Image (tube, rainbow, N blue to C red):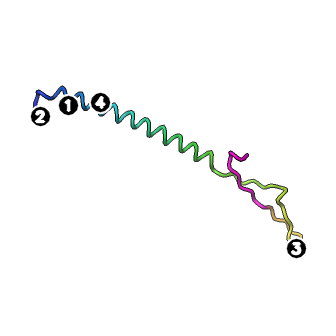
Amino acid sequence: MDPRYTAEIFKHLEMQNELLLESHSSVSHQLHKLQNENNGNISTALVDPACIEGDETGNSAPSVLVMSKEQL
């Protein structure tokens, strides 16, 4: 390596390091945000008493209503 350019190369590498750290932080934040969103969107199975129907033999089977947390 030519010693005349050492300072320039070092400065360039420092800037690249900063950009990589910022990118890592941004990607980690986005991943965390998406994981939280995914956890929040997991549907919850609820049994709605209004949906319980009986068949010809009188057996009742509850209908399962699936709702997201936004619908609750």
Callout 2 crowding tier (Cα within 10 Å): few <14, some 14–19, many ≥20: few
Residue at 11%, 34% (x, y): give it: 1
Residue at disc 4, secondary structure: helix
* Amino acid tagged 2: Met
Q: Are marks 1 and 4 in contact (CB under 8 Å)?
A: no
Mark whose residue sits in front, 3 or 4: 4
Q: Is residue 6 above or below residue 53?
A: above
Q: Which residues are magenta?
A: 63-72
Along the viewing direction, whichever of 12 and 1 lies nearer the viewer? 12
Q: Quadrant of residue 22?
A: top left
Residue 56 lies in what quarter of the image? bottom right
- Say which label, 1 or 4, has the lower sequence index: 1
Question: Which residue: 25% across, 32% down?
Answer: 13
Disc 3 marks which residue? Answer: 56
Q: CA distance from mark 2 to mark 3?
A: 88 Å
Where does label 1 land, which residue? 9
Q: Earlier in the sequence, mark 2 or mark 4?
A: 2
Q: Amino acid at mark 4?
A: Met
Label 2 – label 4 distance at C-alpha: 19 Å
- Comes first in the chain, label 3 or label 1: 1
**Residue 26 highlighted magenta (yes or no):** no
Residue type pointed to by label 1: Ile
Tell whether label 2 touches label 1 (CB within 8 Å).
Answer: yes
Q: Secondary structure at mark 3?
A: loop
Nearer the observer: mark 3 or 1; the answer is 1
Disc on the earlier residue, 2 or 3: 2
Q: Secondary structure at mark 1?
A: helix
Residue at position x 85%, y 56% in the image: 50
Task: Please provide percent x and percent y for residue 64.
Answer: 75, 59
| Residue under numbered circle 4 | 15
Residue at mark 1 to residue at mark 4: CA–CA distance: 10 Å
Q: In this figure, which residue is indicated by the disc labeled 2? A: 1
